[in-house]
Amino acid sequence: MQNHHPLAAMALLAALASAPGLAASYPAYQEGQSYSAGDIVSNGGSLYQCREWPYSGWCSGSAYHYAPGTGASWQDAWTLYQDGGSTDPGLTLASPADGATIEQGSTLAIVAGFDGPAPALLRILVDGTLLGEVSAAPWQLSWPAASLGSHSIRLEAVDDSGVVLAETSATVMVTAPQPPEAPQVSIQSPAAGANLTLGQQAWVSAQVSDANDDVDSVSLYLDGALVATDTSAPWQLAFTPSALGQAQLQLKATDSQGLEGQSAVVAVQVVEATPPPTGGNLSCDITQIYKADGQECMGDDHGRRVIGYFTSWRTGKNGLPAFLVPDIPWSKVTHINYAFAGIDEQSYQLRVDDAATNMTWPGVAGAEMDPAYSYSGHFNLLNKFKKQYPDVKTLISVGGWADTGGFYPMTTKADCSVNNSGIETFADSAVAFIRQYGFDGVDIDYEYPTSMKDAGNPNDFALSNACRSTLFANYVVLMKKLRDKLDAAGSSDGRRYMLTIASPASAYLLRGMENFQVTQYLDYVNLMSYDFHGAWNHFVGHNAALFDNNQDAELAYWGVYNQAQFGGIGYLNAAWGAHYFRGALAAGKINIGVPYYTRGWQSVTGGDHGLGGKAALPNQSDCQPGTGTGTVGCGYGAEGIDNIWHDEDLQGSEIGGGTMPLWHALNLLHAQELGIDTMPSYGSLFGLDPAKAADVITGQYVRYYDNVAKAPWLWNEQKKVFLSTEDEQSMAAKLDYVVQRGLGGVMFWEMAGDYAFDAAKNEYGPGDTLTTLAYNRFANAAPANLAQNDLAAPAAQLDLALALSGFKDGDANYPINPTLTLTNHSSQTLPGGAKVSFLVPTSTSDTISDQSGMGLAVTQSGGNDNSEGISNEQDFHQVALTLPAWQTLAPGASVDVALVYYLPAAGVPSGVRIEVAGQTLGLKADFPVLPEAVLGGGNDGGDGDGGTGSGDCAAQGVDPASYPAYPNWPQLDWAGNPDHANQGDRMTHSATVWQAKWWTQATPGSSDWTQVCSY
């Protein structure tokens, strides 16, 4: 969930095996010697070539010069070189995985991947024998697994002179074919004794295993009679109980050999339907998610959303303090997001660990299992407590920082095209999962489907960087499929299921996510409006500023404040993220993220008590993968007692980051008055050692507050430690922002970081202080704003479509210059001189133009730089273009406009209006119930009724044959007979096309009708 995002990430050091004697034929690199673009040197057994100007300036002769192959940033100046111009292709063995098992007699696909330039030739050897050579994509061959035992596979990338540039290998095991065995099947849910509702569809989840992996079908029997069959995983079968009383359920699984396995019989009770859940101040049907007015159904004491992430790993089983389901402040929250489920990279199905469904906590008050469920663990307790708090929704969050890896193969094939079958499987799995475990929806936390290189978890770079250009397009397919599947399941189950996301709020990441055209599928967006600063670089700043303070050191370094095209907009703050999504969503569908944890640095120099200073890791060659870039080094993250919630690297070592729960930060702040001399009582549980200087309290922590950014921090002058934190003052500012801007609510990561004072221990510990503050502030808040904009509604619509396309990838997407395409889907010709206006969110500046000669310009600036507070904020710029007088837009025709803007903006264009013939029209897609405008004539004096429309139909592009002729009415009565016309319907009569002004049975030509054209 935590949103690590370096402004630009470090390239990984590639290994290059030089041919014998090759390095010796070039001069060795000499520190201090002058090198020019194109110079080739040897260093450490490899060859390097000085890059082109201006990068060549870093080869030598600069205080910032880099030695080739040394440190974190040498690739800013040098490239790896092979004699003949070949460079390291970045060879990987995509399939099979090392240690994979394959059955004798089957065929194994051996697939190579390249992170760098493709070689001239790929050799594939099995057990030292050449299987074959490949000289073009797809880089793969098939190998028949004929002999049992272990086999070695080796790949060699070869250049055009026969030099092996790189090689990699793996071992696979060929096993004997499994003799046919009958499948095994059991009923996962419902549990024995569970209540099913008479007349309401019920779902049975099967657990199926088969040694031969050839299950064909699973059938469900009700009281001995076949009622349903499923032919694919995840084996979900539906039936509708038709009789009260006890019912016997049994499953039978059949494989391709006709072998059959049976489950034990599970007895359930069929009972009468009960009213929708009540309690917890609930006065609406929460299963329908929304009320009639469009507001979300929540407890009556919840005016806005209070969404908390509950993490699976704080079980207490590892000796660390537990945070369990009974610890959740259930009466204060509206939604609980369970973090996390992962995606199996082979089956593409959801998976969870034992804590979710197979763990118990004997002796822990409130954590007793509910016997009504066939599973234990956190999921059992979540559903147990939902009975007591029916106004709280639960969603399964999928992915997260550490477990996003499954998204890449599930959505994207090796050739970077969309993996439709993987998406289909995952979506089916997600539906089955929430049905089985009682969740109200799915929360997608994919970090990140962006085209920006080296974004996300460095452990995923081999997957993510290979297909950056298609990740977002494939993400759109995923979200649409999920929405469709959830809606279909909801329709079947008589309810609605939610689909939400945790979205980055970083302009760097969002620049690679096009127009964020997935918002149409979402119930709402949770903004990860934190991790704006962290030890991935040396700039010391706020973790979660609400506003920009016009002094952000990172933004100043990149010239954001003094380059006119940015409009002074500081974009590392929550307000900027909210403005970004206002382009696509109503304010009420946007939730601000709040961190219940800190970030921090040590050995900080400069700044205001550290704020705005620098803290670079002393040895930049020790930077973590994906951190530091070019002249911006990685940061020196706080460690020890200032980092008790730290991540670990692949070797299990602490990664400095100044990460801790808020309650621990308060113990550091108040250590003297609380009498904490070395460490709090829990210190040893987190591995702190009183004998280590970094693990004990040294110096004094003092709180400071940035009243512009609305963000606090702690500063330890003696240690030069800066900790960006969160407290009641900053939380109150965020809550006021949500209420006054009409936003949906707040989300926080994670619940275990909130605080309360424990008088018995005389120290701070886990609590619900900030969550309670949110609950109290929202309890009587006005409803959230559900209007996407405040434009006046038009009286009529036209079927015109506007869409953006052609976004560049990665760093090439600056300035942002997509193509805006206007397409006329109506039956009328849009005349020259028509004016088309639309809204652009103020996440970008008002420097917006086109390169197509259409005269696109900002007609109304909403300019604000996110530093002026709530009262001066505006959400949109208004932009307009006018079709040249000579250029009409006939039915079916399109015109392209090359847009240019400078910061990411979602939902462009929104709020589209067309001014033509004295009318102001909306789009049919936005106003489908409005009548279609009549463009003919245009001489109505601007009263908006469309004029007399006496022109020729052919000249207007209107086809009379596409409309019914009077008296063949377009609308039917209850018996199915032609009966009337509705507002906007068209008919032909007396060689004229007419359009109904309202519901009518009058003859076309009367006052109920408008003349469109004659023929």
Image: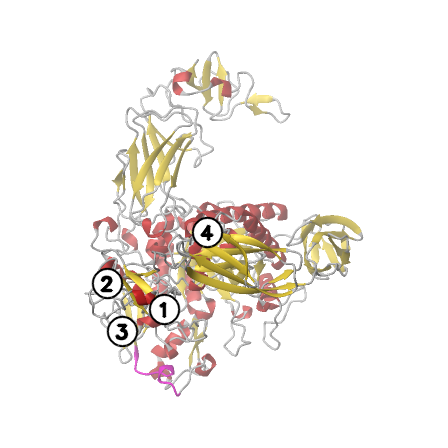
Of residues 179 and 678, which is closer to you in this image? 179
Quarter holding residue 556: bottom left
Residue 337 on the magenta segment = no
Residue highlighted by disc 2: 58
Q: Are marks 1 and 2 in contact (CB under 8 Å)?
A: no
Q: Kindly report which numbered mark, 1 or 2, lies closer to the viewer in this rendering.
A: 2
What SS does tag 3 mark?
Answer: loop
What SS does tag 1 mark?
Answer: loop
Residue highlighted by disc 3: 604
Task: Indicate which disc residue 828 carries.
Answer: none
Bounds of the magenta segment: 691-701
Quadrant into which the C terminus falls: top left
Residue highlighted by disc 4: 524
Query: Residue 18 at x, y = what percent?
Result: 38, 65
Residue type at mark 1: give it. Answer: Asp
Q: Residues within 10 Å of mark 2 (few under 14, many from 20)?
A: many
Residue highlighted by disc 1: 727
Left or right of 737, for residue 219: right
Residue type at mark 2: give it. Answer: Trp
Q: Are marks 4 and 2 in contact (CB under 8 Å)?
A: no
Quarter holding residue 853: top left
Q: Residues within 10 Å of mark 3 (few under 14, many from 20)?
A: many
Majority SS type along the magenta span: loop
Residue type at mark 3: give it. Answer: Val
> Which badge, 1 or 3, is on the more N-terminal residue?
3
Q: Does any portion of residue 526 appear in the rendered image? A: no
> Which badge, 4 or 1, is on the more N-terminal residue?
4
Q: Residues within 10 Å of mark 1 (few under 14, many from 20)?
A: some
Alpha carbons under labels 1 and 3: distance apart: 23 Å
Alpha carbons under labels 4 and 2: distance apart: 47 Å
Q: Residues within 10 Å of mark 4 (few under 14, many from 20)?
A: many
